[in-house]
Image: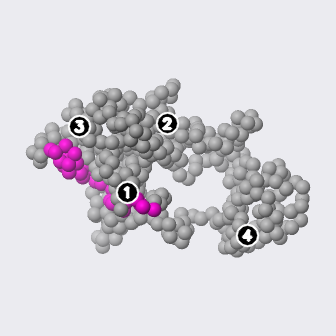
């Protein structure tokens, strides 16, 4: 079956991570995503390692840098299912060419610094004049308005400014960046939701609209517990490691052969007695200090050493089997290799093999959305820079080979 966005045309002017991840999701849903890149340079992510190449025996090996036959696996991981056309938007003819493509598009996504599209003569008003039904989405560090709008920003900047780094890490220690690019990915997900909402509304109004996404706004939006505690209690949350601010036990514990996460929500009355029995401490069940998650949190320093000592007596496998059998949320802390082998993750099809024309099969994380009738499309290889320039201009604008050749000669496209 075609994907749910089959027939949708998306112009992708994004770079690095937040925008490309958003447009990759749209491509996974079946949209025709045309990636617009600068000739000669392309998306800067093409220069991000690690790089893959093939040795003399045809085996995939790591390469030290981008070059002939060496490809960025970082770029490939977030640009599958797209086509690439290289247009120099700094040239008036290049900007005019994009405006022609806009007439055929449903969506345009960009993540330049605010004001850049206007410098090209490609601000929303200009695009809307050519296509009133266009949905345009801009992702930037701080949004299109406000005192910080013109500032540059990357993932870790907005994590710091949005409060994420202030609550991530161990007590009494400095800021710790989460192991994933939460700032970029969160913005990508909110943009994807916004685009589909605008497209749905367009069915009623027959009009497009402009979407302004700030990475900083998105960080604030996902800090629901931290701001709730601040506005309710006047309390400034601090770093508390893996534990939960109001429920206990709710954190990672050391076991005989690794680490394990146990999570008992504060409102649960039936799990605590079962957990006490499982760790062979029935005397804790009727202790008045530990009757609720909030009470256990208030007496954290007395309770946790007891639990830690008990869990160190057996392995992850032992505790997962015992506690999950009781209905208690529990799971091992797995490294990336262990996740890659995990039978649950593999059963759910969370890794996809992409057939690259030069490297052969390359494996990446897949799409987590499971649709019963219109599933996500199969993964195709990320495009080379300008790989589809001739194809796109012929299909979208009806250009002849001679016209395309002239644009190449003029340096407008590559």
The circle drawn on residue 3 is: 1
How far apart marks 1 and 4 lie (CA) works out to 40 Å
Q: Residue at x 26, y 47 (%)?
A: 85
Closest to the camera, between mark 2 and mark 3, is 3
Q: According to the image, label 2 marks what residue?
A: 214
* First of labels 2, 1 by sequence position: 1
How far apart marks 3 and 4 lie (CA) works out to 62 Å
Looking at the rendered image, the quarter that the N terminus falls into is bottom left
10 Å neighbourhood of mark 4: few (<14), some, or many (≥20)?
A: few
Viewer-closest of 321 and 128: 128
Closest to the camera, between mark 3 and mark 1, is 1
Question: Mark 1: which secondary structure?
Answer: loop
The answer to whether mark 3 and mark 4 are in CB contact below 8 A is: no
Q: Residue at x 53, y 63 (%)?
A: 336
Magenta run includes residue 381:
yes
Q: According to the image, label 4 marks what residue?
A: 326
10 Å neighbourhood of mark 3: few (<14), some, or many (≥20)?
A: some
* First of labels 4, 2 by sequence position: 2
Q: Which residues are magenta?
A: 372-399
- x, y (%) of residue 196? 43, 45
10 Å neighbourhood of mark 2: few (<14), some, or many (≥20)?
A: many
How far apart marks 2 and 3 lie (CA) works out to 28 Å
Q: Is residue 305 above or below residue 399?
A: below
Determine which quarter of the picture holds residue 303. bottom right
Is 279 displayed left or right of 6 in the figure?
Answer: right
Q: Is residue 75 above or below residue 127?
A: below
Q: According to the image, label 3 marks what residue?
A: 100
Say how many tags the image has.
Answer: 4
Closest to the camera, between mark 1 and mark 4, is 1
């Amino acid at each position: 079956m075609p994907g749910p966005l089959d027939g949708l045309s998306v112009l992708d002017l994004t770079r690095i991570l937040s925008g490309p991840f958003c447009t990759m999701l749209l491509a996974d849903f079946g949209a025709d995503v045309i990636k617009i890149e600068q000739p000669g340079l392309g998306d800067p992510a093409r220069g991000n390692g690690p790089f893959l190449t093939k040795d003399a025996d045809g085996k995939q090996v790591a390469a030290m840098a981008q070059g002939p036959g060496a490809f960025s696996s970082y770029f490939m991981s977030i640009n599958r299912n797209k086509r690439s056309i290289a247009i120099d938007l700094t040239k008036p003819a290049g900007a005019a060419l994009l405006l022609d493509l806009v007439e055929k598009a449903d969506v345009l996504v960009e993540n330049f610094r605010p004001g850049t599209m206007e410098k090209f003569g490609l601000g929303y008003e200009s695009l809307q004049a050519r296509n009133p039904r266009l949905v345009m989405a801009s992702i930037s560090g701080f949004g299109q308005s406000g005192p910080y709008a013109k500032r540059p920003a990357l993932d870790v900047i907005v994590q710091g400014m949005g409060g994420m780094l202030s609550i991530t890490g161990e007590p009494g220690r400095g800021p710790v960046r989460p192991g994933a690019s939460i700032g970029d990915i969160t913005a990508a997900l909110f943009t994807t939701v916004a685009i589909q909402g605008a497209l749905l509304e367009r069915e009623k109004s027959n009009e497009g609209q402009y979407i302004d996404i700030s990475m900083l706004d998105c960080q604030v939006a996902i800090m629901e517990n931290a701001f709730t505690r601040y506005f309710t209690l006047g309390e400034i949350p601090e770093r508390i490691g893996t534990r939960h601010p109001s429920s206990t036990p709710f954190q990672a514990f050391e076991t005989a052969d690794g680490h394990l996460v146990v999570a008992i929500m504060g409102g649960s009355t039936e799990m605590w007695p079962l957990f006490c029995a499982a760790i062979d401490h029935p005397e804790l069940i009727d202790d008045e200090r530990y009757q609720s998650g909030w009470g256990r949190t208030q007496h954290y320093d007395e309770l946790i050493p007891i639990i830690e000592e008990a869990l160190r007596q057996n392995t992850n496998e032992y505790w997962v089997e015992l506690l999950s059998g009781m209905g208690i949320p529990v799971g091992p802390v797995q490294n990336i290799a262990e996740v890659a082998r995990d039978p649950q993750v593999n059963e759910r099809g969370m890794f996809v093999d992409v057939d690259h024309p030069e490297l052969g099969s390359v494996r990446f994380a897949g799409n987590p959305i499971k649709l019963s009738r219109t599933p996500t499309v199969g993964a195709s290889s990320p495009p080379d820079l300008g790989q589809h320039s001739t194809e796109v201009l012929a299909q979208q604008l009806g250009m002849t080979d001679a016209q395309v050749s002239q644009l190449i000669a003029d340096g407008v496209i590559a």
